[in-house]
Amino acid sequence: MARIKLVCERGRSIELDTTRTALACIDFQADFVLPEGRAGALGSPIEPLVAAIPAAQRALSAAREAGMLVFFTRECYAPDLSDLNQFRRQNDLAIGSQGPLGRFLVKGERGTEIISDVCPRDGEPVIDKAGFSAFHQTTLDTVLRVRGIDTMLLMGYTTQCCVASTLRHAVDLGYACVLLQDACAAYDPADHEATVRVMYSEGDNFGWVSDSERLAVAVCSI
């Protein structure tokens, strides 16, 4: 067991037991960030997502060095979209549509896969989720609890959507959460910044905000 002190924003910090801490790598998927992916091909501003990759790599390296559990998520749906809920089916017509890297957010398509810059190693869990939260109808809570995890560091795409949805769900399940702000991104930086601001609301009940550089420094102290 190793304990580290992670310095956070607003003069706060959190003590982490590295054996009870997991790094959540949320939806680093090709269609979201690669120029040849669906978002890039449609002209979406992928630059903020691309810019977050070095910080994500730094956080990933630090977590692995510290011996933390690292897991990845992918938002993806069955080819027949049978696991896509009725609301999304009616209002998100992009899901299942054809794109340059295959059908958007469909299991097995190239665009749904995790990018090579931030990808899992053998033995690191990959959680496929048919929704925004990584806990929604998945085995993630069990995966974490059988390993004794009680704290999560979160990074990924997009800050205001799948990252925030997973974080809020985790808090309701009793996990302590730290948002690694430089390793997260949204197409509109204002959405990212608003999500970070929300972390300070409700008396800090959503958790802590830190970054990949502070994590790397903390791990170096072990």
Image: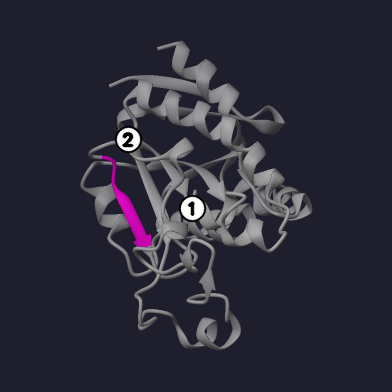
Question: Which residue is denoted by mark 2 in the rendering?
Answer: 20
> Could you tell which of marks 1 and 2 lies nearer the N-terminus?
2
Q: Quadrant of the C terminus?
A: top left
Callouts 1 and 2 close, C-beta under 8 Å: no
Above or below, comparing residue 63 to residue 105 in the picture: above
Q: Which residues are magenta?
A: 124-128
Q: Which x, y percent locates residue 36? A: 58, 53
Q: Quadrant of the N terminus?
A: top left
Residue 194 on the magenta segment: no
What residue appears at the point 64 percent right and 45 percent down from the top-left corner? 49
- In front here: 74 or 215? 74
- In front here: 201 or 196? 196
Pointer 2: residues within 10 angstroms few (<14), some, or many (20+)? many
Report whether 123 appears left or right of 152: left
| Front label number (1 vs 2) | 1
Q: Which x, y percent locates residue 2? A: 33, 19
Question: Which residue is denoted by mark 1 in the rendering?
Answer: 29
Residue type (three-letter) at the residue carrying disc 1: Gln
Pointer 1: residues within 10 angstroms few (<14), some, or many (20+)? many
What residue appears at the point 49 percent right and 21 percent down from the top-left corner? 5
Residue type (three-letter) at the residue carrying disc 2: Arg
Residue 125 on the magenta segment: yes
Question: Is label 2 in a helix, a strand or a loop?
Answer: helix
